[in-house]
Image (cartoon, rainbow, N blue to C red):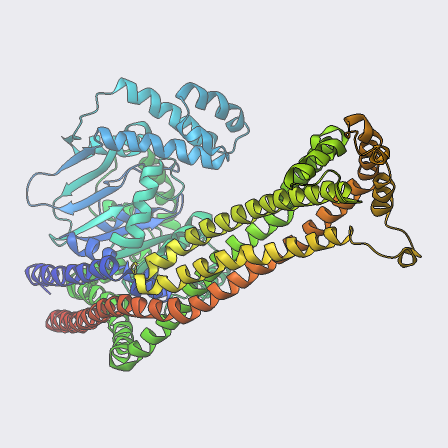
């Protein structure tokens, strides 16, 4: 496939994948419930559309050279290109991502420096990584002096020391350097660029280095990328390596150290590799470097171990592998051209190569080059670049987009649409009825419970608080009674005598026992009236409180039925009817108990008191015999002194016996009226509950039915809209999938 064909296919496929991304984002925004109900693996795969978009957005095809520490990535790039471009060293030389691409113009290097924001972000990356490493996350935002003070003792033990020391260097350099707010790009010679690449301090502030070289055999749209290993101290460059391996690389040359296959660094890269594109394996070339340093037996064992690892890592069979000595491959090409390297590090390797040249390669640079397999690697990689990479890149992007989104999403959309159609065609009406029943039940039980709670709380208050109030009022009344008995006119025999004589003409003397009966009758009447007022007052307060609480509870009932007065009238009727009967029932108790008090004064034969006499009558009978001596002299008037003894006896009798009877009378009333009050309240609650069932519930059902009908109409409309939207989305995705397939079909 020609580069122009690839670029046309890339742009077309990118446009189609971006349409899928728009569909995905629209689903996430408008139908989050649908997306959240998808299996977790489907949701994760949906997001991989971004990876395909990122890769296709880059017009260049990137071949990433990755590997662990000192695996020989830079050496392999040099050998692959047949010239010394990237520095050689046993140290971590690739301190910054280095891009190599062809040019027909002047050979040069572009140094792309970080801008101010990127430098700030790098500082934060250092802080977070160090804080996480030493498990002190609170230091990530601490002042620099505090950060250094806390971390320095921890780093002195060796773990993380290199990272911490590099951060300190970064901070020092950051204050010394003039950082361009927008970043800057400087040009340099290829030789100067080598120094920048191996200078870790300079590399901190470099985003990338681009080497433009002539006669590289690289197609114009292909870029080789020498990536830092995952053990490089700069966290930003590690992130770039992660990003390339997982998302951006179109093909990979994975460089392994044959003497220690899949060491820690290389294992981490394979895990990134497996987490990336599902088909990246078919675009990967596996290179085992320093192969000639192994004995024949170790070579057989190492290759067997390599194949086992491929199976463990689930790398599909058919992978392409090479066994090489990259340095010898480079030096053999320089030797064939009669060139001598200027780089001191490479000159040291040259001595080793020349020693092996005569022993291992028969003095032939051509043999050394052939055994390094560099030509085979060049041939297969370049053939892959020219013949397959463009098609494979487009096909992989298409297949990944289809398998990650264009196939599973329509399947789940259809299932959701079928469920929506079932709802629209019948299940929705049944659900509407069920929802209405549930809401009516819930609301009715809630309102009934609110009403019964108010009544129950009032009953508890009556049983405790009102009883205490009545007891206190009774005590006050009895104290008043005692005061009247002990010294009031109400128990003064002479005062009562005058009242009796004054009531009728032609009377001079009261009948026998009349004064005593008049006194007790007056006291009884006063007590009954006063106590009736007290009880009445308590009953009215209880009922008023009951009405208040019922009205409060019914306020929500009234609101539920939209203030329909016809629904509320029966509640008001219950309250009105019960107000009169409520007090009448209590009055009946008071009058019944009063009759018992009056009965104490009825005459009964003494034989009636065999089991105990009536002390009040006995005392009053004794009082009746006193104070009328002057009756023998009709001409002499009755004076107060004549009735002093009578008064004294009456008061003594009442104080000793009557007050106690009154207490018992009041206790009896108290004990009987409150159960009646509570029982009446329960009856009122029962009647109100009946009204709720007969009036409120039917009215509530009508109101909620309208609300739910409106809600379900909106739901129906929403479901119909979603069903239509899902159908259209399915059609769009399937159309895009067909268009993507046509792009890859034309590219093969």
Residue 634 at what x, y percent from top left? Answer: 80, 34
Depth check: 274 or 601 in front? 601
Quadrant of the rendered image containing residue 641: top right
Locate residue 100 relative to residue 349 in the image: left or right: left
Q: Residue at x 51, y 61 (%)?
A: 684
> Residue 533, image x and y in percent?
58, 44
Q: Nearer the viewer, residue 714 or 148?
A: 714
Q: Tell me if I can see residue 200 in this picture.
A: yes
Which image quarter is the C terminus in? bottom left
Q: Nearer the viewer, residue 182 or 255?
A: 182
Q: Seen from this angle, which residue lies furthest bottom?
A: 426
Which residue is at 33% across, 57% downward? 559
Would residue 326 be visible to someone looking at this image? Answer: no
617 over 31 or under it: above or below: above
Image side of residue 5 versus residue 498, left or right = left
Image location (x, y in percent) of residue 589? 65, 56
């Amino acid at each position: 496939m020609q580069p122009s064909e690839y670029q046309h296919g890339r742009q077309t496929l990118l446009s189609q994948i971006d349409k899928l991304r728009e569909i995905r984002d629209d689903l996430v925004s408008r139908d989050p419930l649908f997306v959240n109900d998808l299996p977790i693996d489907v949701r994760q795969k949906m997001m991989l559309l971004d990876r395909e978009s990122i890769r296709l957005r880059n017009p260049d095809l990137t071949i990433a050279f990755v590997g662990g520490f000192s695996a020989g990535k830079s050496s392999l790039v040099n050998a692959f290109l047949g010239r010394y471009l990237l520095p050689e060293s046993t140290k971590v030389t690739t301190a910054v991502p280095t891009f190599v691409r062809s040019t027909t113009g002047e050979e040069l290097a572009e140094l792309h420096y970080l801008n101010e924001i990127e430098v700030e972000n790098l500082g934060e990356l250092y802080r977070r990584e160090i804080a996480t490493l030493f498990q002190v996350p609170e230091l990530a935002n601490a002042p620099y002096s505090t950060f250094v003070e806390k971390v320095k003792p921890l780093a002195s033990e060796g773990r993380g020391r290199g990272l911490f020391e590099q951060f300190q260097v970064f901070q020092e350099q950051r204050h010394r350097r003039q950082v361009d707010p927008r970043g800057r790009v400087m040009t340099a010679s290829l030789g100067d660029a080598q120094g920048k690449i191996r200078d870790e301090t300079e590399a901190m502030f470099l985003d990338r280095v681009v080497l433009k070289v002539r006669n590289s055999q690289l197609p114009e749209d292909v870029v080789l990328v020498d990536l830092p290993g995952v053990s490089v101290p700069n966290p930003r460059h590690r992130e770039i390596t992660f990003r390339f391996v997982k998302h951006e690389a179109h093909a990979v040359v994975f460089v392994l150290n044959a003497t220690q296959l899949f060491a820690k660094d290389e294992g981490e890269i394979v895990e990134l590799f497996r987490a990336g594109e599902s088909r990246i394996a078919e675009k990967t070339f596996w290179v085992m470097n320093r192969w000639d340093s192994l004995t024949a037996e170790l070579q057989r064992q190492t290759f067997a171990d390599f194949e086992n690892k491929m199976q463990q890592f689930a790398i599909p069979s058919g992978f392409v592998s090479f066994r090489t000595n990259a340095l010898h491959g480079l030096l053999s090409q320089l030797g064939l051209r009669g060139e001598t390297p200027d780089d001191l590090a490479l000159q040291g390797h040259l001595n080793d190569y020349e020693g092996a040249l005569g022993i291992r390669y028969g003095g032939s640079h051509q043999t050394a080059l052939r055994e390094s397999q560099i030509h085979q690697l060049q041939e297969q990689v370049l053939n892959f670049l020219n013949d397959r990479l463009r098609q494979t890149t487009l096909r992989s992007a298409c297949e990944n987009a289809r398998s990650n989104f264009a196939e599973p999403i329509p399947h789940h959309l259809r299932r959701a649409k079928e469920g929506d159609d079932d709802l629209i065609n019948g299940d929705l009406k049944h659900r509407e009825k069920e929802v209405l029943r549930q809401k009516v039940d819930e609301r009715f039980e809630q309102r009934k419970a609110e009403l019964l709670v108010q009544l129950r709380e009032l009953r508890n208050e009556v049983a405790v608080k009102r009883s205490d109030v009545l007891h206190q009022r009774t005590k006050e009344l009895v104290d008043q009674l005692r005061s009247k008995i002990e010294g009031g006119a109400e128990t003064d025999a002479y005062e009562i005598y005058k009242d009796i004589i004054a009531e009728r003409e032609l009377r001079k003397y009261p009948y026998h026992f009349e004064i005593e009966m008049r006194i007790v009758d007056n006291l009884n009447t006063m007590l009954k009236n006063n106590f009736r007022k007290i009880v009445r007052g308590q009953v009215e307060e209880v009922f008023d409180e009951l009405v208040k609480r019922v009205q409060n509870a019914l306020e929500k009932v009234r609101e539920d039925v939209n203030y329909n007065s016809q629904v509320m009238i029966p509640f008001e009727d219950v309250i009105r009817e019960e107000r009169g009967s409520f007090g009448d029932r209590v009055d009946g108790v008071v009058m019944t108990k009063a009759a018992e008090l009056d009965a104490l004064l009825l005459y009964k034969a003494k034989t009636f008191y065999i089991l105990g006499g009536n002390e009040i009558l006995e005392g009053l009978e004794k009082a009746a015999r006193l104070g009328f001596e002057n009756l023998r002299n009709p001409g002499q008037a009755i004076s107060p002194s004549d009735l002093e003894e009578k008064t004294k006896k009456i008061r003594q009798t009442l104080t000793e016996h009557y007050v106690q009877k009154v207490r018992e009378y009041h206790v009896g009333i108290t004990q009987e009226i409150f159960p009646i009050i509570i029982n009446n309240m329960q009856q009122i609650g029962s009647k109100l509950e009946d009204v709720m069932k007969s009036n409120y519930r039917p009215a509530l059902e009508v109101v909620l039915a309208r609300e739910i009908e409106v809600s379900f109409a909106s739901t129906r409309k929403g479901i119909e809209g979603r069903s239509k939207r899902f159908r259209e989305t399915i059609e769009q995705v399937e159309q895009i999938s067909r268009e993507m397939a046509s792009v890859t079909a034309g590219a093969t």
